[in-house]
Image (spheres, grey):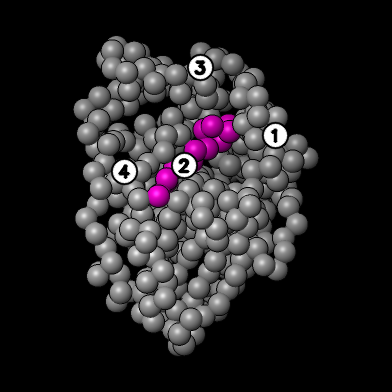
Amino acid sequence: MVTDTPQDVLIDRVGRTGRITLNRPRALNSLTHGMLETVRAALDAWASDDRVAAVVLTGAGERGLCAGADIRAIHDDAKLGGAGGRAFFRVEYPLNELISRYPKPYLALMDGITMGGGVGLSAHAATRIVTERSTVAMPETRIGLVPDVGGSRLLALAPGELGTHLALTAATMTAGDALHCGFADHFVPSAALPGLLGSDDPVAALPSLTEAAPASELAQQREWIDHCYAADSVEEILERLRATGLPEAKEAVEQLLGKSPTMLKVTLAAMRRARTLPSLAATLEQEYRISCAALTHHDLVEGIRAQVVDKDRDPRWSPASLSEVTDDDVARFFAVPEGGDLQLPR
């Protein structure tokens, strides 16, 4: 796994505000095991510290909050058996759950690119802020994985079938889309962020800096998305998309056909199950099972190779077609992993 440096996360306190800054701007603040442990330690300490009234999460640099986990490290580890990846998830997922019930105001600035693990550190917060520069996504199916860090719950709870569309295609959300789909709460222009960060009380300052949310393009496409993605199988979703004759649906077909057939079927099953799960903790338990299974599946290593390592954008999935993926193939992703479940508090 990637070697951490003491400055990969900056922890400080400005007045009564605890500040967490993800500080790997050249890597778009992608997360390492050590970074997660640093964030967890700070949150644990501040929870009972009367000097800290609120917490603010930001990302260093101009490009975004966080692009997710360091997937090159996950790729290298998965080739060796995935022990490091499992250890990473055992720190990451409980941290996501802690953020969802943190006892003090937790403000996440989802400015710029906020994807994957970055969503896990921000979209479960009490106060989630997007800007005109925000690009939010759960892009896991691009690399032979399934939406995790509680993302499958957020997507499952989005209006209609918008979350299913986003999960399967790995499409990105604008600020307006993120607000509409339940990933964010407030729209603040990026030019106003210094005022928010410089405030002695960012919670009190937020209302005066918040502006009307931009329109959601996804919301305007609900009719065809809801119809197509309500189908019970990936194969039927594809049939319905083709039948619409719409350019947007044709683009979705092309996106789906480029993804791992196995992970498409596992993602759809995870999304449907997430709707019935009682809590974020239960969803994270399910995602942990899926992620552990993915670490030993051909398509994760191959997907990261094609997208990030060799960058040939030509993954060779195995199995190569939807028809070859059986119900048993999907079921194994939901089995209790070696070493047991996370045992998150319920």
Q: Earlier in the sequence, mark 1 or mark 3?
A: 1
Q: Which residue lies furthest to the bottom in this view?
A: 50
Where is residue 115? Give x, y as percent: 49, 47
Q: Which amino acid type is marked by label 2?
A: Met
Report helix, strand or loop for mark 1: helix
Residue placed most toward the observer, 162 or 13? 13
State the extent of the magenta-drawn residues as a range: 133-147
| Residue drawn at (75%, 57%) of the image | 3
Mark 3, residues whose alpha carbon is within 10 Å: few (<14), some, or many (≥20)? Answer: some
Q: Nearer the viewer, mark 1 or mark 2?
A: 1
Mark 1, residues whose alpha carbon is within 10 Å: few (<14), some, or many (≥20)? Answer: some
**Decide: marks 1, 3 in contact (CB < 8 A)?**
no
The CA span between labels 1 and 2 is 20 Å
Report helix, strand or loop for mark 3: helix
| Residue drawn at (65%, 63%) of the image | 8
Residue 137 on the magenta span: yes
Instruction: Identify the residue under disc 1.
Output: 309
Q: Which of marks 2 and 3 is in front?
A: 2
| Residue drawn at (53%, 69%) of the image | 20
Q: Which of marks 4 and 2 is nearer the N terminus?
A: 2
Where is residue 176? Give x, y as percent: 29, 46
Instruction: Identify the residue under disc 4.
Output: 177
Instruction: Identify the residue under disc 2.
Output: 138
Residue 127 on the magenta span: no
Q: Which of marks 4 and 3 is nearer the N terminus?
A: 4
Instruction: Identify the residue under disc 3.
Output: 322
